[in-house]
Amino acid sequence: MSNRTWACIDCGKTYRRDQNYTGNVLCAICRKECEYVHWKIHLPSPKKKKEWSAFWEIYLLEKNKLDKWNIDGSIEVIKLDLLNMTLHPKRKT
């Protein structure tokens, strides 16, 4: 069984849980909710503050676009570089 990664954006602490885990992960340091990271994505080191911040800015933007596409798939073509995906408008049936 493989594990998945959650990360606290503020603290930089990462946590591993079973891939079937469905609950929220709270940071043991700041007690904020951690962000799930897609399994194909490599996280930069939290010690490299600029890379860490830039990664999360892009990742959260792409995640937001993906969520919007799931709600309304009729929007334009969306390219998600981090996730290596291109989403095309859904066809209406």
Image (spheres, rainbow, N blue to C red):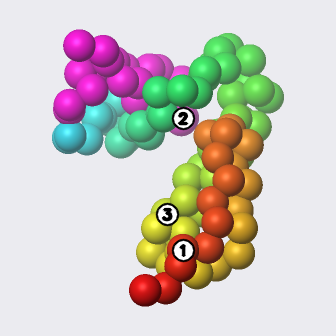
Please report whichever mark, 3 or 2, sits nearer to the chain's N-terminal start: 2
Which three-letter amino acid code belongs to the residue tagged 2? Asp
In the depicted structure, whether residue 43 falls above or below residue 36: above
Front-lying residue, 74 or 20: 74
Task: State the SS at label 1.
Answer: loop
Q: Is residue 57 visible?
A: no
In the depicted structure, whether residue 86 falls above or below residue 37: below
Q: Is residue 23 visible?
A: yes
Q: Which residue is mark 3?
A: 67
Q: Is residue 4 left or right of residue 89?
A: left
Which three-letter amino acid code belongs to the residue tagged 1? Lys
Mark 1 Cα-neighbour bin, 10 Å: few <14, some 14–19, many ≥20? some
Residue 78: x and y in percent read 70, 62
Residue that appears at 68% across and 53% down = 86
Q: Which residue is mark 2?
A: 10
Which disc is residue 90 wearing? 1
Which three-letter amino acid code belongs to the residue tagged 3? Asp
Q: Is residue 88 left or right of residue 8?
A: right
| Measured Cα–Cα span from mark 2 to mark 1 | 36 Å
